[in-house]
Image: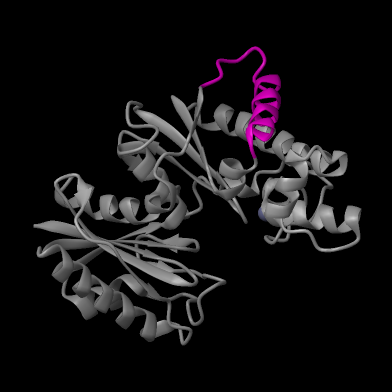
Amino acid sequence: MGVIGIDLGGTKIAAGVFSGGELRSRITVPTPEAGGQAVIEAMAKAAQTAMQEAGESAKAIGLGTPGPLDYTQGVIKFAPNIAGFTNFPIRDLLEKATGLKVYLENDANAAALAEHVLGAAKEASSSLFVTVSTGVGGGFVLDNRVLHGAHGQGAEVGHITVLPGGPLCGCGLDGCLEALATGPAMERMALAVYKTEVTTRELFARFEAKDPRAARIVLQAAHYAGIGLASLVKAFDPEVIVLGGGVALNAGPAYLEEVQRSYQRYMEGWIAPPIYMAKLGSEAGLLGAALTAGLEVGEV
Ligand SMILES: [Zn+2]
């Protein structure tokens, strides 16, 4: 008997049965646009299909979800990309729909847990995971436990201030790491420079072709990412950093060199833990969701 992992995203739901240290099935269905109860039903059905495909039943469900969570109440406080998910009692509703115990985790924390237990930080006792893509997310794991903090906002690493007075962030504050280092942040700068919309992917292509304007944008984003990592290391002191996400994994070696340069510069005089690249790719969320339940019920 295994556990089921469910990775709930704004556009798709991934589910799979995890047992004996690996995923025995993987299925993906679209996230119902109606939101709310329709999402619960889609997840329950996905869990059922995942068990059928694995030919195995499950002890519990681990659910990775976007948005800040109230872990005690099992409630999503809000998830901007899913309709009807404000103060939504997702844990109780999914338990009722499946008859299985449900363990909740924030999706970035779930990915952090997966990289810690099975991925790039496997050998470390503590790790800080940072993902740079359309947002900046992350999680801190110590001895297989994810830091939640007192208010469910532990390791919200995208919103550390790296440039007071800098561009405004989606959270309403100025100068957050997320407002400076992500794909959308670079696209904003590209629009100002090129006077036309340029996607992150196109920007990386121009950067590789040595376009000086693209280089300025991408290297500046890398610079802030490095500063962010250095600040986070001083707060958490992890054994290793795991860096993932579409920007970090696709921007190229010159981007990573700049991240390292600025990270080392702001770690001068301190012990700088190594930065490893994330290993599990898009499967980290699903694996981490499964591990969230697996670690609770002794199935890891
Ligand atoms: Zn912010």
Residue drawn where x is 83% and y is 39% of the image: 216
Instruction: Identify the image quadrant of the C terminus.
Output: top left
| Rendered position, 292 above or below 60 | above
Query: Is residue 90 or residue 116 the one in the foreground?
Result: 116
State yes or no: residue 124 in magenta: no
Query: Is residue 183 or residue 262 the one in the foreground?
Result: 183
Q: Position of residue 150 (x, y in %)?
A: 45, 50
Magenta residues, start to end: 252-273
Instruction: Identify the image quadrant of the N terminus.
Output: bottom left
Residue drawn where x is 45% and y is 83% of the image: 35
Q: How many marks?
A: 0
Is 50 left or right of 29, judged from the image as shown?
left
Q: Position of residue 38 (x, y in %)?
A: 37, 85
Q: Residue furthest front?
A: 209
One can see residue 14 in this view: yes
Query: Is residue 147 or residue 53 the one in the foreground?
Result: 53
| Rendered position, 113 above or below 15 | above
Q: Position of residue 247 (x, y in %)?
A: 62, 46
Residue drawn where x is 16% and y is 75% of the image: 99
Q: Where is residue 63, by image quadrant?
A: bottom left
State yes or no: residue 259 in magenta: yes
Is 229 left or right of 102, judged from the image as shown?
right
Residue drawn where x is 72% and y is 52% of the image: 179
| Rendered position, 297 above or below 5 | above
Q: How is the image coloured?
A: one colour
Q: Position of residue 7 (x, y in %)?
A: 37, 62
Quadrant of the picture in which ligand 1 is shown: bottom right
One can see residue 148 in this view: no
